[in-house]
Each structure stands twice: as structure tokens, then as C-alpha cells.
Image (spheres, rainbow, N blue to C red):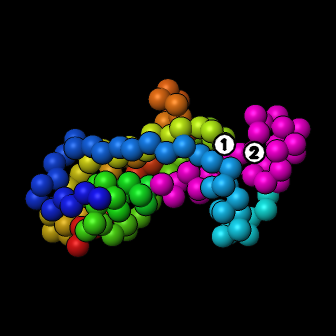
């Protein structure tokens, strides 16, 4: 876990990490949320609909933005205030995602940073993009 103080954070600073999407993640997310949409839960159904296999929940993919803020940038002092995301492409079991945040703005009065965030599949293809506002406690 990172321990950035507000004053240590600079515009253009970035942090990133990788995560592999697993079948277990989809199963746990289904149990947690109760979302049993067959595109996410049924391999054959998803293939019949033209997908490569079970499609990862968009909100599962977006949930790694919490990890980005809470563990990497700024780390332990983060309090997410807002998240705006666009899902660009489906994500599948076995995809390795790079989750990255770049500091675009700092607001000294509120001790808040704004990040441009992306999730990129297998190092080549953006699957998610967005912005986060994060207070630093």
C-alpha cells in the first residue's frame, strides 16, 4: 500500500497495477450482487450471443478503480468522492488488465486530486476509461 501525502502528489504522476480476470471473480460478483445475467454466468449462452465466453461484469472491472485509489494513488489516505467510467469493450475470463491512474488536477482547498483512469487488456486494448475524484484525508 502506498502512503502518499497530498503535498507529494504532482500533476502527471501515475500509478498502475495488473490483475487477471478469473472465473472465481465472476462467480463471487454474481453471488455478491445477485446479477445472474446469462452473459456473465453461462458460457454457452454468451457464445451463442457472439461473445468469446462469459463476459466480465462492467462493474467488476470498474471495482478495481477502488484498488487503484486505496492501494496505489494516493493509497491509505484516499476517500473516493466520484467515479465516471465508460466501458469500451467486453472483458473476458483470462484477460490481464492494467489499471492505471494519472493525476490531472489538484485542488488544494479541498485536498482532492482528479485522476484520468484506464483499464487496458493484455497491454494493447483499452476496455475502460474514466475519471475519479479522490479526497486525501
Say above or below: 14 vs 24.
above
Q: Residue at x 20, y 69 (%)?
A: 110
Question: What kind of element bears circle 1?
Answer: loop
Residue 125 drawn at (x, y percent): 53, 30
Residue reaching furthest top? Answer: 124
Q: Position of residue 2 (x, y in %)?
A: 25, 57
Residue 90 lies within the magenta run: no
Query: Residue drawn 41% across and 58% down?
Result: 67
Residue pointed to by mark 1: 93
Give the image location of residue 74, x and y in percent: 26, 58
- Where's residue 103, x and y in %? 26, 48
Write the residue at 48% across / 54% down.
Answer: 64
Q: What is the quadrant of residue 111 in the picture?
A: bottom left
Which one is in front, 28 or 130? 28
Residue span colored magenta: 38-64
Most common secondary structure along the magenta stretch: helix
Residue for badge 2: 54
Please check the rendered image and state whether residue 55 is part of the magenta-colored stretch, yes or no.
Answer: yes
Q: Is residue 133 visible?
A: no
Q: Residue furthest left?
A: 7
Left or right: 109 in relation to 88: left
Q: Secondary structure at mark 2?
A: loop
Work out whether residue 127 or residue 92 is closer to the camera in this orientation and state it: 92
Q: What residue sits 24% from the left and 64% below the top? A: 112
> Do labels 1 and 2 touch, CB within 8 Å?
yes
Amino acid at each position: 500500500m502506498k502512503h502518499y501525502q497530498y503535498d507529494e502528489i504532482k500533476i502527471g504522476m501515475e500509478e498502475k497495477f495488473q490483475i487477471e480476470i478469473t472465473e472465481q471473480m465472476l462467480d463471487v460478483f454474481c453471488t455478491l450482487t445477485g446479477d445472474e445475467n446469462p452473459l456473465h454466468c453461462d458460457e454457452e449462452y454468451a457464445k451463442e450471443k457472439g461473445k468469446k465466453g462469459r463476459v466480465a461484469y462492467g462493474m467488476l472491472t470498474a471495482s478495481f478503480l477502488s484498488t487503484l485509489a486505496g492501494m496505489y494513488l494516493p493509497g491509505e489516505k484516499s476517500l473516493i468522492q466520484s467515479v465516471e467510467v465508460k466501458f469500451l469493450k467486453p472483458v473476458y475470463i483470462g484477460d490481464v488488465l492494467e489499471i492505471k491512474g494519472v493525476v490531472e488536477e489538484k485542488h488544494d482547498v479541498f485536498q482532492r486530486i482528479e485522476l484520468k483512469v484506464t483499464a487496458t487488456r493484455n497491454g494493447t486494448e483499452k476496455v475502460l476509461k474514466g475519471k475519479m475524484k479522490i479526497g486525501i484525508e
